[in-house]
Image (tube, rainbow, N blue to C red):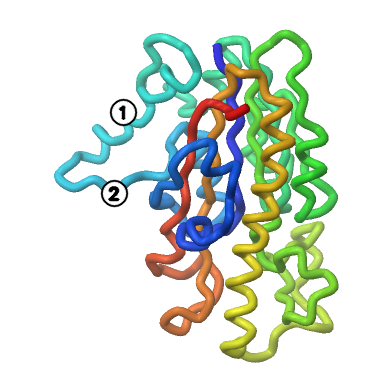
Amino acid sequence: MNNLVFIVFDSARFDHARAAKTRWLRKLGRIEKRYSYASWTSPSHFTYLMGQLPHLSPKKTFASKAYERDLRLWSNRLGLKNLDFNSFLPELSLPNVLRAHGYRNEAIVSMPVLNPKTILARYFDSYRLMPSHDDFAGIVDRVSFTGGRPKFYFINAGETHYPYCMTDSDLPRLHGLHGTLKHIGDGFSGKKTAARFFSKPDLKRMKNRQIECIEALDSQLERLFEKCPPNTHVIVTSDHGELFGEDGYFGHGPIFHEKVFEIPFVEGRVPH
């Protein structure tokens, strides 16, 4: 059986991933444009843990057939025979399927909205919320393939989510659920909360900042891949995109816009 490492670059949109200089992502495979099932972090991650990956938006296809086809692909990824839609019933849970085949399931997440008290933590042997939203290097430190059992790592990296590692930046900050509260109940006020829509120079700098953060995450993939045994299948994607002033929008969530749903998708056997 193959190990599985599933990484979500939170909020990274497709065109930014394509524009970034990503040596290790491109070693893994082609950066493909796919579409998220949701415009916000929680429902998107829930869908991934059902076993449904970002979709291709096929024409003249019944949705049920697309779901069945996508779930059958897990057989090749994992080296397990005869996985199909029925294998996921009735829980509709990828970690539950893996657990039934002897995997140890570990999740390491960066966004507080994904914290271990949520339903997302079900069927995991270990589920950890990182102290900081922008510590993918620290996540990589925690990855280990000792113990003899095949591993499933589900990882959420927050560097690409606003405020983009901007602790010492002069860019305006958003607080609350669009920012990175340590606790959901902390409130939404803050000294630097934006009181107006961002200027064009601010938006351009933010776009460039997300691209830089994708490159920073990519640089850590080398160290992660070195830890992975050769029989490790790796998936790197995003949960949703982000708006930076296009058509008057900023952010994601309660926004319906193509850039919120266009996300990168890369998968393949771990490169060495």
Q: Which residue is mark 1?
A: 68
Q: Position of residue 116 (x, y in %)?
A: 73, 40
Relative to 92, say whether 164 is above or below.
Answer: below
Q: Quadrant of the C terminus?
A: top right
Rounded to the nearest angstrom, the CA distance separating label 1 from label 2 is: 15 Å
Q: Position of residue 70 (x, y in %)?
A: 35, 31
Q: Position of residue 57 (x, y in %)?
A: 29, 49
Number of the front mark, 1 or 2: 2
SS label for mark 1: helix
Q: Left or right: 130 with respect to 194?
A: right
Total marks shown come to 2
Relative to 138, say whether 161 is above or below.
Answer: below
Q: Which tag, 1 or 2, sits closer to the chain's start? A: 2
Which amino acid lies under the numbered mark 2 shown in the image of this protein?
Answer: Ser
Which amino acid lies under the numbered mark 1 shown in the image of this protein?
Answer: Glu
Which class describes the residues within 10 Å of circle 2: few (<14), some (14-19), or many (20+)?
A: few
**Label for residue 256?**
none
The residue drawn where x is 59% and y is 46% is 23
Which class describes the residues within 10 Å of circle 1: few (<14), some (14-19), or many (20+)?
A: some
The residue drawn where x is 69% and y is 47% is 219
The residue drawn where x is 66% and y is 45% is 156
Q: Residue pushed farthest left?
A: 60
Q: Position of residue 144 (x, y in %)?
A: 77, 24
Q: Left or right: 110 with respect to 34?
A: right
The residue drawn where x is 32% and y is 34% is 67
**Label for residue 57?**
2
The answer to which of 181 and 269 lies nearer the viewer is 269
Q: Quadrant of the N terminus?
A: top right
The answer to which of 101 and 172 lies nearer the viewer is 172
SS label for mark 2: loop
